Amino acid sequence: MSAEDLERYETEMELQLYREYRDVVRMFAYVVETERRFYLANHVDVTPHQVDGDVWFELELNDAWVWDMYRPARFVPHVRVLTFRDVNVEQVPREDDPNPPFLAEEDES
């Protein structure tokens, strides 16, 4: 396999992963981003811990989907993440929400 073939394969895998994400994102309540992974989940607990002035985070995700093109199964029932880095948790706008945040901002202008 040439380097070009490998690059083409990885590009196709990323495109397939994006399409899967687009198809499943509305099934989840939260988008969670860490320094290593990107997750979708229906339940998220973030617990900060402090030790000797350093802060680290413990995340518990239930009913999750993992953005990782090399995983054979991206849907997982439980994920536990420990990190010293930033964590971003966002609520996914619901389709049935009459005033999702991104539309409410547009209406105010």
Image (cartoon, grey):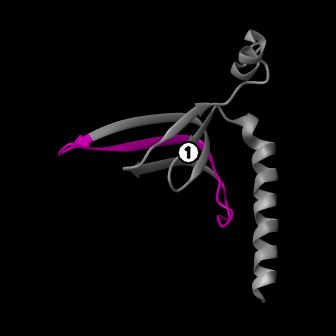
Q: How many marks on residues?
A: 1
- Was residue 70 drawn as part of the magenta stretch in this picture? yes
x, y (%) of residue 108? 73, 10
Write the start and end of the magenta stretch as one range: 50-74
From the viewer's side, name the closer residue of 3 and 13. 3
86 sits to left or right of 94: left
Question: In terms of image quadrants, where is residue 99?
Answer: top right
Quarter of the rendering occupied by the N terminus: bottom right
Residue found at the very far top of the displayed protein? 108
Residue found at the very far bottom of the displayed protein? 1
Residue found at the very far left of the displayed protein? 52
Name the residue rendered at 82%, 51% in the picture. 19
Name the residue rendered at 52%, 39% in the picture. 88
The image shows residue 92, relative to residue 96, as above or below, that is below
x, y (%) of residue 107? 78, 12
x, y (%) of residue 28? 67, 35
> Is disc 1 placed on a helix, strand or loop?
strand
* Secondary structure mostly taken by the magenta-highlighted segment of the chain: strand
- At label 1, which amino acid type do we have? Glu
Name the residue rendered at 52%, 41% in the picture. 61
85 sits to left or right of 31: left
- The crowd level at tag 1 (other Cα within 10 Å; few <14, some 14-19, many 20+) is some
Name the residue rendered at 17%, 45% in the picture. 52
x, y (%) of residue 58? 38, 43
- Was residue 102 drawn as part of the magenta stretch in this picture? no
Quarter of the rendering occupied by the C terminus: top right
Question: In terms of image quadrants, where is residue 23?
Answer: top right
Residue behind mark 1 = 33
